[in-house]
């Protein structure tokens, strides 16, 4: 693979001009090798303080978007590619940062719908915007800033400026840290309260069923099953998945990407994807949403996006059991306030049907609780459950749908948390 220079992309890379020359002058450990002083308190050490100070000059762009960090010794780039493509297919604006590159340094950054290398024009414009701050950082750090540090900071700045929904970041840990990678990750994840995803569980299974060719390119067809009941409950079955990266190790990388995608929080983009699905499958009858969420999600954006699609007739809110407990669950009272505010912002009239305490569907209020006009003759019904999820809540939703229907079949959609969906599947299976 190519070293960390401007690359041999030719053509479009010729537009990079001063940027390529500037980067070539920086200290480059990919080319020279990891220094003996790495990991020590010296000029050769990997000083994260140096990186923090550079990012601070650039406006701390890394704090403007959620990120998935992919670490390990092998397979990081493949896993990043799998996960980026999964998220793009779900409607996310994805930024991806990996290294090294094959032909051009632009391959290290991908952004937008296609997943191709960042354009030379966009990268040059970004550099021109940031050059003064980078110059100041290089001077204040006595020239110690490296090629990798500067290019990584530029990628974060680009992701921030392009308002990505999520960034997929390949983490480079090596040299004296290679034997301690797992412990380093667990320590950092503990400090930031971030989950660690590993596709090593007895409930995760995959098999390659055949090797084939499609348009002159080889692929392996795989069956993937994820069925995890502890920690974060996950379940999905994927059959005849075509991977254009071959080998058992690539199938394992695809598994890791699948598990990570399942664990990612609901955001505005995922709500939009769900809204699009509802548009496709929704019958003519009424729509009921059963919603429960963790307390660290984008509640208002999620509600607003769902309300901007096919308007639900009924919204039932509850506290989702997260990993067997309720400490991380968003309270139903707070969740109700969010959904009422989102309905108000969308100009949707609604009726608060209160707290559901039994299987009996509540008496529907005759007047909406919100005075704003709506295109629908009937106000949207908003209620909440006083207990964790049970089949009774689905029965209540069904009865409310029947009370709103004019002879057409309705749809009940359970959303907001994979943990809630897991509870539904468990209850329905009893």
Image (tube, helix red, strand yellow):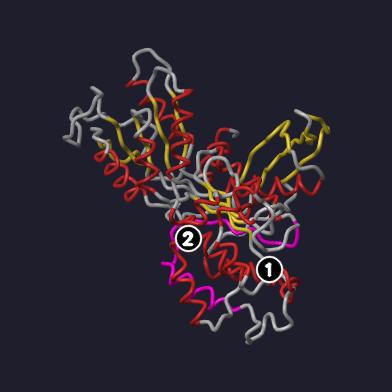
Extreme bottom residue here?
42
Q: Secondary structure at mark 1?
A: loop
Cα distance in 3D space between marks 2 and 1 = 22 Å
Say left or right for 353 vs 51.
left
- Where in the figure is residue 422, as x and y percent of width and height? 56, 41
State which region is magenta: 47-74
Within 10 Å of disc 1 (Cα), the crowding (few <14, some 14-19, many 20+) is: some
Q: Please determine whether, in this image, residue 323 is positioned above or below residue 177.
A: above
Quadrant for residue 401, please give it: top left
Extreme top residue here?
407
The residue identified by callout 1 is 173
Which residue is depicted at the point 74% across and 71% down? 178
Between 81 and 281, the one nearer to me in the picture: 81
- The mark nearer the N terminus, 2 or 1, is 2
Q: Is residue 190 magenta?
A: no
| Mark number displayed over residue 84 | none
Which residue is depicted at the point 50% across and 39% down? 91
- Where in the figure is residue 255, as x and y percent of width and height? 70, 46
Q: Secondary structure at mark 2?
A: helix
| Mark number displayed over residue 157 | 2
Which residue is depicted at the point 67% across and 61% down? 71
Within 10 Å of disc 2 (Cα), the crowding (few <14, some 14-19, many 20+) is: many
């Amino acid at each position: 693979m190519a070293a960390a220079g401007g690359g041999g992309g030719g053509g479009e890379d010729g537009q990079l001009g001063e940027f390529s020359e500037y980067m070539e002058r920086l200290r480059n450990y990919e080319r020279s090798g990891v220094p003996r002083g790495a990991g020590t308190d010296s000029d050769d050490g990997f000083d994260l303080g140096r990186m923090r100070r550079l990012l601070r000059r650039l406006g701390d762009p890394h704090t403007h978007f959620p990120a998935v960090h992919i670490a390990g010794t092998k397979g990081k780039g493949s896993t990043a590619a799998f996960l980026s493509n999964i998220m793009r297919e779900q409607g996310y604006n994805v930024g991806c940062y990996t290294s090294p590159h094959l032909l051009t340094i632009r391959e290290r950054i991908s952004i937008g719908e296609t997943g191709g290398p960042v354009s030379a024009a966009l990268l040059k414009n970004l550099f021109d915007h940031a050059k003064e701050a980078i110059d100041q950082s290089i001077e204040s750090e006595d020239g110690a800033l490296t090629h990798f540090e500067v290019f990584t900071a530029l990628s974060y700045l680009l992701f921030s400026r392009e308002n990505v929904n999520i960034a997929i970041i390949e983490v480079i840990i090596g040299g004296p840290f290679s034997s301690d990678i797992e412990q380093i990750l667990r320590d950092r994840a503990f400090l930031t309260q971030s989950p660690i995803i590993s596709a090593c569980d007895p409930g995760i299974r995959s098999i390659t069923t055949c090797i084939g060719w499609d348009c002159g390119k080889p692929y392996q067809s795989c069956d993937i099953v994820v069925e995890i009941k502890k920690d974060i409950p996950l379940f999905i079955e994927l059959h005849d998945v075509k991977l254009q990266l071959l080998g058992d190790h690539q199938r394992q990388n695809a598994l890791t990407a699948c598990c990570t995608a399942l664990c990612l929080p609901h955001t505005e983009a995922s709500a939009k994807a769900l809204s699009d699905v509802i548009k496709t499958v929704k019958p003519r009858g009424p729509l009921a949403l059963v919603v429960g969420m963790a307390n660290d999600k984008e509640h208002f954006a999620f509600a607003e996006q769902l309300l901007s699609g096919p308007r639900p007739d009924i919204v039932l809110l509850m506290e989702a059991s997260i990993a067997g407990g309720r400490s991380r669950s968003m309270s139903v009272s707070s969740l109700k306030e969010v959904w009422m505010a989102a309905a108000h912002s969308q100009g949707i009239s609604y009726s608060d049907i209160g707290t559901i305490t039994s299987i009996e569907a509540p008496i529907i209020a005759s007047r909406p609780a919100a005075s704003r006009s709506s295109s629908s003759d009937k106000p949207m019904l908003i209620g909440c459950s006083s207990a964790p999820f049970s089949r009774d809540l689905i029965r209540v939703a069904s009865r409310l749908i029947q009370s709103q229907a004019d002879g057409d079949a309705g749809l009940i959609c359970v959303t907001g948390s994979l943990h809630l969906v897991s509870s539904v599947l468990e209850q329905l299976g009893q």
